Image (cartoon, rainbow, N blue to C red):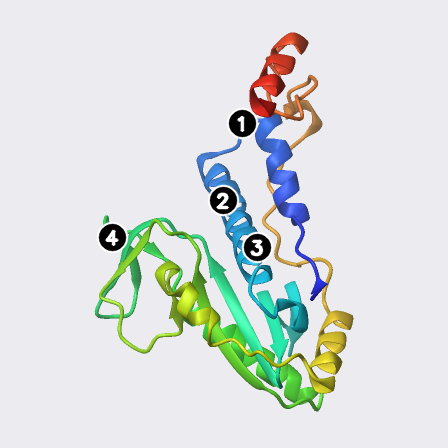
Amino acid sequence: MVIKPRSESKELKLYRMLNMRMDLSDEEVQYYWSLEKGFEGEIQFDAWLNDLPGSENWLILNDLLLEYNRTTFQIDSLLLADETLYFFEIKNYEGDFFIDENGRWLTLTKKEIKNPLLQLERSKSLLRQLLQSLGMKVAIKSKIIIINPHFQLYQAPLGQPIIFPTQLKRFSKQLPVKPANRKCRQISEKLLSIHLKESPYKRLPKYTYEQLKRGIICKSCHSRELQYQDCIFYLHKVLM
């Protein structure tokens, strides 16, 4: 059962609107598309998780923004069941990557990306400390979920908390069958009550009203150039 549903962030909505009405910088466009791709991957994961047998017995919280010791951290998905808390970091990476001898994650062109394992360990540690400060003890199992089937990671050490697309079916069999107990319900209610609604670290682009391009945007094709009859033709193609 989904206790906290997932929704598009205000940051993503703003970038999407500005992308249609002004010329963003290359860096801003890249960041915007990373937001879109990340949200798309999270929606795919939600659909996969909700289709699993027994999902109606779990407590699921999405997009939690929490704070401990003046440090904020985000959790993509949290699943509580059978006295265990499953913490999922979802990645929609696409393409070929490898891990070098220093543990860095790189593309084949040797462009470095953030190490998701460090991100996972940091968030897990903060979550554990937060729960301890609230007097709540629970087993925490954390995993990075790679949701995109067009992803390949080379030179990955064995035993890492990473679930690749080809492993999702096998991993689903490791999830508990027993429903969430009273302790899980208490934890979910407490985390939901301290969830932060606004992130203090949003990367919003600077803009002025004069920079924004005028005109009505088609809700279906997001174009400002098409005429009314063109949009009707577009809708006809989509619906056929």
Residue indicated by mark 1: 23
Vertical position of residue 183 compared to residue 239: above or below: below
Give the position of the N terminus as an image quadrant: bottom right
Quadrant where the image shows the C terminus: top right
Front position in the image: 28 or 217 = 217
Q: Position of residue 43 (x, y in %)?
A: 57, 51
Q: Earlier in the sequence, mark 2 or mark 1?
A: 1
Please tell me whether mark 1 sits on a helix, a strand or a loop. Answer: loop
| Image mark for residue 92 | none
Could you give the CA–CA distance between mark 3 and mark 4, rounded to whole angstroms? Answer: 33 Å
Residue type at mark 4 is: Lys
Please name the residue that numbered disc 4 is placed on: 110
Q: What is the three-letter code of the residue carrying label 3?
A: Ala
What residue did someone put label 2 on? 31
Q: Residues within 10 Å of mark 3 (few under 14, many from 20)?
A: few
Question: Please, what is the three-letter code of the amino acid marked with disc 1?
Answer: Asp
Q: Nearer the viewer, mark 3 or mark 4?
A: 3
Query: Which comes before the other along the chain, label 3 or label 2?
Result: 2
Residue at 27% x, 68% y: name it. 156
Q: Secondary structure at mark 2?
A: helix
- Please give the residue where the numbered disc 3 appears in the rendered image: 47
- Side of 40 relative to 101 (left or right): right
- Disc 2 to disc 1, C-alpha distance: 14 Å
Image-quadrant location for residue 6:
bottom right
* Quarter holding residue 63: bottom right
Mark 4–mark 1 distance (CA, rounded to whole Å): 29 Å
Do labels 2 and 4 touch, CB within 8 Å?
no
Question: What's the amino acid at mark 2?
Answer: Tyr
The span from disc 3 to disc 1 (Cα, nearest Å) is 34 Å
Q: Nearer the viewer, mark 3 or mark 2?
A: 3
Which tag, 2 or 4, sits closer to the chain's start?
2
Callout 4 crowding tier (Cα within 10 Å): few <14, some 14–19, many ≥20 = few
